[in-house]
Image: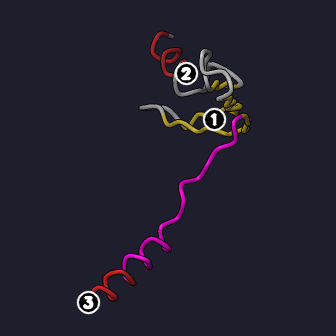
Amino acid sequence: MKFVLSTALAAIAAATPEAPLWPNVFQQTFTETVKYPLKKLATTTGTYYYDVSNPADLMYRIDRAEGINDRYCGLTHHLTS
């Protein structure tokens, strides 16, 4: 019984993948599509920056190409226009 239990636990431990590790610094471009209520799809591009080397500052930053079609300012712009 102990052998079966230890074998099962070893199989489970071997099958569990390790958590992915991000590099300390990287950047990634992206394309974002947002569906606003009562409007067509809006698309913008941007870059995600990640830097864990200086925890006193922000560890990440997201820049979008424009403020009209992103999911934050774009919605506000359409509501106030």
* Three-letter code for the amino acid on which mark 1 is drawn: Thr
* The stretch drawn in magenta includes residue 17: yes
Give the labeled residue for mark 2: 74
Image quarter hosting the N terminus? bottom left
Pick the front one: 20 or 31: 20
- The count of marks equals 3
**Position above or below: 77 against 4:** above
Which of the 4 image quarters holds residue 25?
top right
**Type of residue at label 3?**
Met
In the displayed structure image, the side of residue 35 where residue 27 appears, left or right: right
Residue picked out by circle 1 = 43
Mark 3, residue position: 1
* Residue at 66% in and 21% down: 54
Label 2 neighbour load within 10 Å: few <14, some 14-19, many 20+: some
- Measured in 3D between alpha carbons, the distance from the residue under mark 1 to the one under mark 2, in whole angstroms, is 10 Å
**Whole-percent x, y for residue 61 in the image:** 64, 24
Structural crowding at the residue carrying mark 3, measured as other residues with C-alpha within 10 Å and reported as few (<14), some (14–19) or many (≥20): few
* Amino acid at pointer 2: Gly
Residue drawn 69% across and 30% down?
A: 49
28 in magenta: no
**Residues at circles 1 and 2 in contact by the CB criterion of under 8 Å:** no
Q: Position of residue 58 (x, y in %)?
A: 60, 19
